[in-house]
Amino acid sequence: MAALPMALLQLSVLLLVVVTTIAPVAWALSSPATTTVPKFVILGGTGKIGTSVANHLLNRSPTCEVVLVGRRGGDAAIQEIVDGTKNSDTRRRQRISFQQVDDIWDANCLAPLLQSSHGVSAVIHTAGPYLDETPTVLEAVIAARIPVYVDVSDPLPFLQASLDQLEAARTSQTSALCAAGAFPGMSNVLAMEAAAAAKKNADETIQDVRFNYFTKGLGGSGTINLYITNIGFGEPMIQHDQGSRRALTELSGKLLGQVDFFLPPNNDMISDDNNQQAQQRVGRQQVFAWPFPEAATVASELQIKGSSSAAMGTAPDLWNVMLGLLVNIVPRPWWRSKAFSKFMADFSQPLVLLTDAILRQTTTSDADVGETHAMRIDVTTTTTKQEMTSIVQAHESFRQCVGQSCAEFCLDLLEHPSPGVFLPEQRYRDARDRRRIIAKLTSTPGTFCYTGPVKLSSSSSSTFPTDIDQVVAQAKQEQVEL
């Protein structure tokens, strides 16, 4: 019997050797982090959004490599990123590089970069505006068989042309997500979550979906934000009316009334602290119609039976009033002119910056001047038109929120690939996938409010822009057929 304990001891030693030898190897083979160092190529990487994306990627994945692609400004952008990342050191700077490309929309300029950049994990395209462009970058990424592509595009024709690359992306095993910023992007996913919460059963249908956004000043994104806003005033509003998609040519830029970027208090489902911050720091704001694509794409995805809308506002309210007057005076074809819209953006920027500077002298928080961002999503169903399901999200900085959201979408695609080309509402149809990404998007540094989805009486708050029905009716009367 003495031989039995000895045999057991020898067997235990043998098992220990096997486990300690093989287990680390098996773990290494199953862990993406140990097989390769992620390498991100950011187009428009020296811009305000691009540097914000890089900053978040380096904070979330400290060992990753980042290549900033742009026309100029590489050294300044790298220094800004190094200064803004956690535990900044010399090694962090060594993982960031700059590649000059004069025209990223030119496939002949971009293809050599992608082909020569060995081991690229993802291409992140932040070099807007995207109006009147074609998805040459996506096509180049697919041709190079790069695993992940993400952009922050918004024009519907660009999005549709990108979605047409679905089969090519599947063949190359590229997972691509378009319109993947804050709005559009996070807002699309939150609308899907609100719609799911609004339904009492699977057979219930959505009636209306409303997207309302707010950004103080330039949102930290510089002249490009003014430029893109101006161009949008020349575009038709593509949204749903009585369940069908419709283009309203005379609606963009029209003031729609006011929106509460907070939810009514004294509700068990509402976090009082978060909601109170949103009420104090953002509150009630005036908004104007702007052609965000989610008013069309999310409405189509949800197969709504009523109407959809998308609007944004800024502060101080004087800017909303001035923009409303200009939209009424300036012919829409002028706004669509890139030269005119760029001139107006350059002309307006000093005035906006001066206003921000004055406001900083009269406010207690720098975060509340020039960058604060908020969004509110409202959904109703066909059976509960007097009850809405709402979500409010708010962040200290618009540009950081866009960059962080874009980076989180990219990281999620790397971890959970789905070859093809998708919009956020398509990729995150499944509740488990949706809640996984929402948890990441709403917990980024600087987020000071995420409340919802919460069911409310439509009479308990400014659900939709207060004057939207009258303004839309007027726009229909003034409609110019395309």
Image: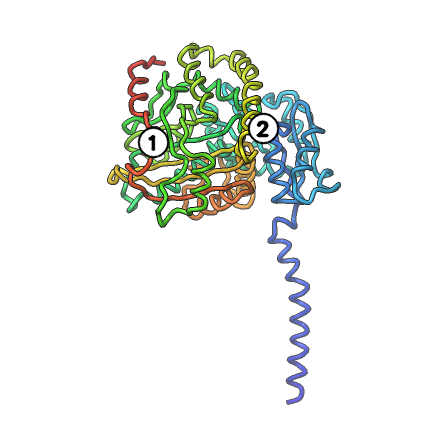
Q: Quadrant of residue 288?
A: top left
Whether residue 149 is visible:
no
Which circle's residue, 2 or 1, is located before the other in the chain?
A: 2
Q: Residue furthest bottom?
A: 1
Q: Nearer the viewer, residue 244 or 248?
A: 248
Observer-nearest of 316 and 396: 316
Q: Quadrant of the N terminus?
A: bottom right
- For label 2, the crowd category at 10 Å Cα-Cα, with few meaning under 14, some 14 to 19 and many 20 or more, is many
Relative height, residue 72 to residue 146 (above, below): above
Measured as percent of width and height from the top left, residue 240 is found at 33, 27
Q: Given the current orientation, which residue lies at the most extreme left position?
A: 383
- CA–CA distance between discs 2 and 1? 41 Å
Give 85 or 339, whichever is nearer the viewer: 85
What is the secondary structure assignment of the residue under circle 2? helix
Q: Which label was assigned to residue 259?
A: none
**Eyeballing the image, is 317 above or below 406?**
above
Going by the image, does 103 lie left or right of 258?
A: right
Colour scheme in the image? rainbow
Q: Disc 2 vs disc 1: Cβ atoms closer than 8 Å?
A: no
Q: How many marks?
A: 2
- Where disc 1 sits, the SS reads loop
Instruction: Give the residue type that dot 1 points to.
Output: Phe
Label 1, on which residue? Answer: 464
**Residue 346 in view (yes/no):** yes
Quadrant in which the C terminus appears: top left
- Residue 384 location (% of width, % of height): 25, 40
x 50%, y 20%: residue: 131
Q: Position of residue 203 (x, y in %)?
A: 27, 43
Residue ID at (64%, 66%): 19
Label 2, on which residue? 140
